[in-house]
Image (spheres, rainbow, N blue to C red):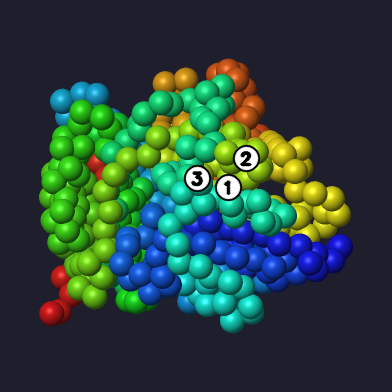
């Protein structure tokens, strides 16, 4: 690796992606200054986590390549996904599809969701201990121009707001101009992770995350999570379709307790098979910021912007590409992008000019972001991809190998780029399942009725 001694970098934004890049550059010989509008304590304790930040194999390897803690030894990990699909198109809300996708059997990875505040705080501590400069300052476009003038490489990782306006939306690469779902998330305690929890969903019980799709309302996910203070916990993440009853309910959340009340009522009215588990959940009294509601417009921006005096700056993470979290691509993409950029910057001998920054972003877009946008649209039941998704979920019920590989797309989404027709979708089913798609799909029979939980209430 080429020495980077004497080269300077500035990173604007001290969230998970920004501080990961800053620490990586520092460890590769750059003189790095990291800017944030909040001090370290405030970053950890005064804001909510930006999401569940569920990551899989490639993103975990990206962290490992930078010598970073993946938290696999301390966080609850998911070995699969337990899926239920309710057809809301008729009056009866038919319980259509039920399957378990076991990650371990075919794709060789586990999922891990870690509080982004914990990751950022741990990495910021290392950054400061190793000699990185941390500056608490709100950076506006004028100040950014001055910062970029004084360093060799400037990265902007301020998320979907802040300085993202310096990077115009790439309309050709962006499928949406508005959010496709309203979101609600809350971190909760009270459940273990053994086979007795969610046992009605499958033998793995709480080792599998629980995903439920109610086609006319939205999606619900419950999975293990490592909270910054409470440690191993559970995270609920819900997606509400525009105009749905779920959207109306989510809008009423104004605290962690109200969010839990909404989640409980949602399960009572729509997902009653999991209600005994939900009744065991409780809020985290030590963290008033353990919940969040909102919406995300999924867009791709130009990876490179220019300041007022023409200094090129690079967009990183959500500033460059934003994702609806339904397919867990946001945190993963930011980590993969950060690790790749650090690796390329450390090996680069020339200037970090617009051409180099653009080529670096385009490589990331081709390797990850383009397919990640597509797999997110697939799980959002985008009208252009919904027919393929319907085939996939039906096939997953009848073939465990296909079910595993379907959720392997959350780790490596590139096979989704082949989905240009029904014939192509069926070919992907055959490739993943190891049998002809038509034969597999002909065996599909609706579930009829899901098994209900028999979890006994825990003693107080």
Q: CA distance from mark 2 to mark 1?
A: 7 Å
Q: Residue at x 51, y 30 (%)?
A: 169
Q: Position of residue 338 (x, y in %)?
A: 63, 55
Q: Identify the residue under disc 2.
A: 309
Q: Secondary structure at mark 2?
A: loop
Q: Position of residue 345 (x, y in %)?
A: 76, 55
The quarter of the rendered structure image containing the C terminus is bottom left
Residue 290, quarter of the rendered image: bottom left
Q: Is residue 205 above or below residue 403?
A: below
Marks 3,1: beta carbons within 8 A: yes
The quarter of the rendered structure image containing the N terminus is bottom right
Q: Residues within 10 Å of mark 1 (few under 14, many from 20)?
A: many
Q: Identify the mark nearer the N-term, 2 or 1.
A: 1
Label 2 vs label 3, nearer the camera: 2
Residue 281 can be seen, yes or no:
yes
Q: Is residue 89 above or below residue 431?
A: above
Q: Identify the residue under disc 1.
A: 145
Residue 56 can be seen, yes or no:
no
Q: Residues within 10 Å of mark 3 (few under 14, many from 20)?
A: some
Specify the label residue 141 is tagged with: 3
Q: Residue at x 71, y 43 (%)?
A: 357
Marks 2,1: beta carbons within 8 A: yes
């Amino acid at each position: 690796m080429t020495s980077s001694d004497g080269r300077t970098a500035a990173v604007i934004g001290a969230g998970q992606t920004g501080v990961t890049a800053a620490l990586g550059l520092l460890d590769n010989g750059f003189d790095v200054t990291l800017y944030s509008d909040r001090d370290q304590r405030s970053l950890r304790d005064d804001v909510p986590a930006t999401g569940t930040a569920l990551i899989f194999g490639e993103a975990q390897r990206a962290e490992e390549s930078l010598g970073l803690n993946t938290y696999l030894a301390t966080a609850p990990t998911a070995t699969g996904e337990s899926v239920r699909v309710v057809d809301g198109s008729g009056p009866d809300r038919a319980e259509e599809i039920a399957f378990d996708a076991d990650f371990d059997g075919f794709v060789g990875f586990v999922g891990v969701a870690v509080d982004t505040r914990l990751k950022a705080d741990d990495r910021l501590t290392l950054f400061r201990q190793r000699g990185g400069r941390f500056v608490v300052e709100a950076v506006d476009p004028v100040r950014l121009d001055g910062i970029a003038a004084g360093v060799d490489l400037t990265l902007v990782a301020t998320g979907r707001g802040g300085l993202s306006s310096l990077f115009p939306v790439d309309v050709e690469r962006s499928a949406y101009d508005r959010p496709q779902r309203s979101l609600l998330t809350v971190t909760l305690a009270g459940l273990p992770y053994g086979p007795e929890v969610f046992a009605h969903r499958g033998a793995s019980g709480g080792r599998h995350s629980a995903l439920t799709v109610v086609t006319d309302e939205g999606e619900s996910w419950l999975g293990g999570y490592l909270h910054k203070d409470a440690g191993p916990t559970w995270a609920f993440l819900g997606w509400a379709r525009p105009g749905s009853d779920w959207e109306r309910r989510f809008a009423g959340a104004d605290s962690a307790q109200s969010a839990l009340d909404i989640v409980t009522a949602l399960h009572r009215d729509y997902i009653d098979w999991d209600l005994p588990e939900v009744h065991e959940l409780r809020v985290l009294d030590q963290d008033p910021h353990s919940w969040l509601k909102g919406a995300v417009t999924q867009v791709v921006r130009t990876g490179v912007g220019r300041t007022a005096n023409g200094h090129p700056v690079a967009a990183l993470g959500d500033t460059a590409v934003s994702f609806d979290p339904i397919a867990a691509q946001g945190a993963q993409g930011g980590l993969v992008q950060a690790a790749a950029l650090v690796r390329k910057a450390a090996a680069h001998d020339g200037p970090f000019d617009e051409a180099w920054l653009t080529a670096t972003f385009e490589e990331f877009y081709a390797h990850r972001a383009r397919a990640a946008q597509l797999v997110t649209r697939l799980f959002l039941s985008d009208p252009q991809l919904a027919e393929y998704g319907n085939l996939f979920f039906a096939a997953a019920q009848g073939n465990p190998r296909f079910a595993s590989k379907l959720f392997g797309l959350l780790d490596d989404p590139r096979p989704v780029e082949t989905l240009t027709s029904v014939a192509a979708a069926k070919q992907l089913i055959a490739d993943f399942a190891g049998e002809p798609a038509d034969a597999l799909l002909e065996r599909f029979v609706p579930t009829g009725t899901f098994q209900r939980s028999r979890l006994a209430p825990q003693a107080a």
